Image: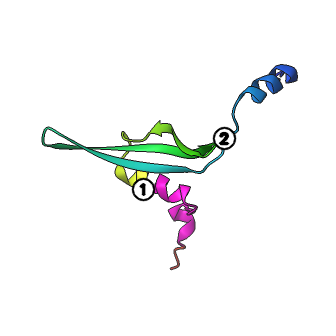
Amino acid sequence: MISVDMYAYNRYKKGMPKRTGAAYVVTTTRHHKGRTYHSHLLRRSYREGARVRNETLGNLSHLPDALIDIIRRSLKGETFVPVAEAFTVTA
């Protein structure tokens, strides 16, 4: 059983900014010395007053392109089902 000090938790939570803004995947392309480099970043956008800011949540560049596409589509609201549930085999 875990005991949580609610006073400390509320004090910690109060100091943290509220996370708003939808997450999305950004792909950037850079050309250097005749080579092309692609990086895929998980980001969210939020406002500070009148300015729109971006926060990078993670670097997805090491993942395969197919998985990055699935992440991108799921963040847009698409749902996925396992293959075993999507099809039924009838004899």
**Is residue 72 in the magenta section?**
yes
Which residue is depicted at the point 53% across and 78% down?
Answer: 90
Dot 2: what SS?
Answer: loop
Identity of the residue drawn at 42% across and 41% down? 60
Left or right: where does residue 38 sit relative to residue 42?
left
In the image, the segment drawn in magenta is: 69-87
Residue under numbered circle 1: 69
Picture coordinates of residue 43, whole percent (x, y): 50, 44
Q: Tell me residue 78's x, y (percent).
A: 55, 63
Q: Give how far apart the Cα atoms at labels 1 and 2 are.
A: 24 Å
Q: Quadrant of residue 59?
A: top left
Q: Residue 50: percent from the left, percent from the top?
A: 60, 46
Q: Say which amino acid is labelled 1.
A: Asp
Say whether disc 1 or disc 2 marks the residue closer to the N-terminus.
Answer: 2
Q: Which residue was labeled with disc 2?
A: 19
In this orientation, which residue lies closer to the viewer: 85 or 58? 58
Q: Nearer the viewer, residue 7 or 20?
A: 20
Q: Residue 24 in the image: state x and y as whole percent.
A: 51, 51
Residue toward you, 49 or 77? 49
> Which element type, helix, strand or loop, lies under badge 1?
helix
